[in-house]
Amino acid sequence: MGRAADGSDVLVVGGGLIGLVTAWRSAQRGLRTTVADPEPGGGAAQVAAGMLAAVTELHHGEQMLLGLNVASAARYPAFVAELEEASGRGTGFRACGTLSVALDTDDRAHLRELHALQRRSGLASEWLSGRECRRLEPMLAPGVRGGLRVDGDHQVDPRRLTAALVTACERAGVVFRRGWAERLSVTADRAAGVVLADGARLDADQVVLAGGSLSGRLTGLPEEVLPPVRPVKGQVLRLRVPPVYAPFLSRTVRAVVRGSHVYLVPRADGELVVGATSEEMGWDVTVTAGGVYELLRDAHELVPGITELPLTETRAGLRPASPDNAPLLGPTALPGLHLATGHHRNGVLLTPVTGEVMATLLTTGEVPELAQPFTPARFAATGSREPVRTSVPPSAHQEQPA
Ligand code: GLY
């Protein structure tokens, strides 16, 4: 491919986890790479809990996505080892496993069904009685009726992961342009770069749109390439486990309580992350009393001792959801413009595989086989596009990808 004069080979729009990993992998392959973002490393990764939940978040009808999720989970240990080496920073990766528990008969039936689906899908999980669950995690409520032990669903700290990626990008020669990408430039029916809000023009041979839930906000995108992503709000709490209570939990503990997911993710440094609501509220990132109340109420039912812990932070972020909950990875109908967005609940989990897929696409023009079901073309073909074009408050511009 020809190089844009005075420009980059690759311009990544959006400096969240997905944009950063795309830029890092692209620079590693020798491409001159620029990232445009007002605040690289911000966005949904600053809120996300960082569960790598390929098995425990399996849903009926999402078996195709499962393949990509499992492939990315398998890459995590080597990915973080390479990234930690390249950046000199830790990522908080913790091979701790997960316990999904049931609090009543309905929950238990639901979890049994999930277990059967996991087994049919060839995934490793083990059914435990309530007593066995409490033996593993003594802080669990006496009412826990059973659970699924999934030793392969680990965690990473998305804030540390993001900081490591920013440093790795800098060391690999990625150029950061701290500005809001306002408009796509199109020259001779080909994406040619973007114009920033301050009027600066960034030229590039290839453009990757990795703007999370805001990916559809770039003006100048032809209608047929508008990414069908929408924001799904998640409110998340952070607590601290004082040394006297440690180890409070030794692995991620989760459940579905009254139809809502609640999870508790214990970090090695004593942070305990409790998430998350799932709300269709547009770009609203208000932390509400109701959201905090529901999370604490549900977490308290699982682990009553949680109310003793200091509450250190409440925050809301936006998952970039696509119509089928799977990411959009690959070329668009506009030559030179690619998408890496729509990761919904799996942005952190899918970071390693996304970087690999996008770097292959950027260097060879080909989408690797494992990502072929996830190209944007699947929406163009079915006509099931749901592009989002409502107005965004200026503050939401800081909220970039998951
Ligand atoms: N994957 C966890 C969440 O999106 O809440």
Image (spheres, rainbow, N blue to C red):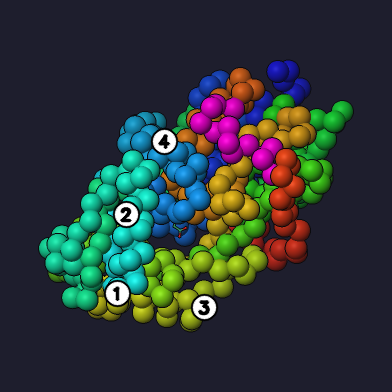
Q: Nearer the viewer, mark 3 or mark 2?
A: 2
Pointer 2 residue: 115
Q: Amino acid at mark 3?
A: Thr
On screen, residue 95 versus residue 345, left or right, reads left
Q: Magenta region's main secondary structure?
A: helix
Say whether disc 1 or disc 4 marks the residue closer to the N-terminus: 4
On screen, residue 150 versus residue 72, left or right, reads left
Start-end of magenta stretch: 367-379
Distance between mark 4 and mark 2 Cα atoms: 20 Å
Q: Amino acid at mark 4?
A: Ala
Distance from mark 2 CB to nearest ligand 1 atom below 8 Å: no
Distance between mark 1 and mark 2 Cα atoms: 16 Å
Distance between mark 3 and mark 1 Cα atoms: 28 Å
For disc 2, the neighbor class at 10 Å (few under 14, some 14 to 19, many from 20) is many
Q: Nearer the viewer, mark 1 or mark 4?
A: 1
Picture coordinates of residue 137, whole percent (x, y): 18, 63
Regarding mark 3 in the picture, which secondary structure is present there? Answer: loop
Q: Nearer the viewer, mark 3 or mark 1?
A: 1
Say whether disc 4 or disc 2 marks the residue closer to the N-terminus: 4
Q: Nearer the viewer, mark 4 or mark 3?
A: 4
Pointer 4 residue: 71
Say whether disc 4 or disc 3 marks the residue closer to the N-terminus: 4
Picture coordinates of residue 277, whole percent (x, y): 48, 68
Pointer 3 residue: 288
For disc 1, the neighbor class at 10 Å (few under 14, some 14 to 19, many from 20) is some
Q: Is residue 365 magenta?
A: no
**What is the quadrant of residue 364 in the picture?**
top right
For image coordinates 53% across by 22% down, the residue present is: 29
